[in-house]
Amino acid sequence: MLLNLNPYRVSINPSVLVSSAEEMLAHAGSVQSLRNYLNWDPEPEVLTTGFPAQKDARKLIQLVKDYKLRRQLKEKRLARGFEDFIEPRNGLKGWWQKKFCDPKELKLSGGHEILEFLRHSHRLMLLASLHDALLSHVSAAEPRIIEIEESSNYINPLMEMTAKSDMAAAERAVKALSAPLGKVEPDFLIYGVAGYVLGYDRKKSVAYYLA
């Protein structure tokens, strides 16, 4: 679906970005209050399913830890000359690799498991929707269609967290997933997630989004 969308750039008023996020979250005391503030009528499913705190949010920490360790084991395996799990394990070094190292690496979670966990998070889907909704509060001009290269510098922060096995970023994500919605940090809503709005750039006073 995203391949059929065009990238746009729109000027924003960066001075109201944080205050707009704060105001939005201040109305997150209840589903009805937030729905009324956002003028989401009828009430969308993403709001009702994503409003409660995510009970298994801390599972993300273990997934990221496992992936980080798996990457470290892979680097050691490659350094020993074993590029995959199919090639023969010859000699004492090969026996040791097959007996002790391969099973440990294979049982650990990979990046796919992290992305699947995030993809099935109702709270994350709601946070991404709120992140997108901020644009209507801070945009300051008509949007302009741009070349895809200009918007490609804005990487989904949770994809970056996965790619780098960034434990600090994982802790911030868990805090946002497991907290009452009104207690989510405004900065996380702005910079910690991405949806159709790829990113808000306060220094350039612009936002990039797909439509």
Image (tube, grey):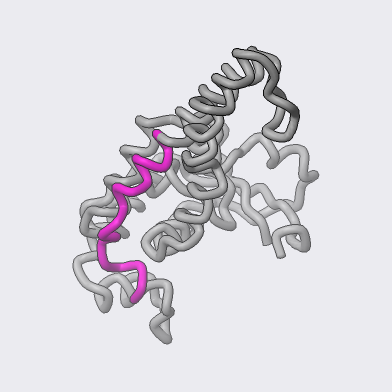
In this view of the protein, which residue sits in the foreground, 9 or 116? 116
Answer above or below: position of 81 versus 38: above
In this view of the protein, which residue sits in the foreground, 53 or 210? 53
Q: Residue 29 location in percent, x, y? A: 19, 66
Residue 136 shows in the view = no
Residue at the outermost bottom position: 42
Residue at 52 percent of width and 33 percent of height = 105
Magenta-colored span: 48-65
Which image quarter holds the N terminus? bottom right
Residue at 21 percent of width and 72 percent of height = 30
Answer above or below: position of 137 versus 32: above
Residue 103 shows in the view = yes
Residue at 35 percent of width and 41 percent of height = 62
Q: How many marks?
A: 0
Residue at 46 percent of width and 62 percent of height = 120
In screen coordinates, is 101 left or right of 124?
Answer: right
Q: Residue 148 location in percent, x, y? A: 77, 45
Q: Residue 43 occupies which quadrant of the picture? A: bottom left
Answer above or below: position of 201 versus 133: above
- Indicate whether residue 203 is drawn in magenta: no
Which image quarter holds the C terminus? bottom right
Q: Residue 36 location in percent, x, y? A: 32, 77
In screen coordinates, is 17 left or right of 77?
Answer: left
In screen coordinates, is 207 left or right of 83?
Answer: left
In this view of the protein, which residue sits in the foreground, 172 or 162? 162
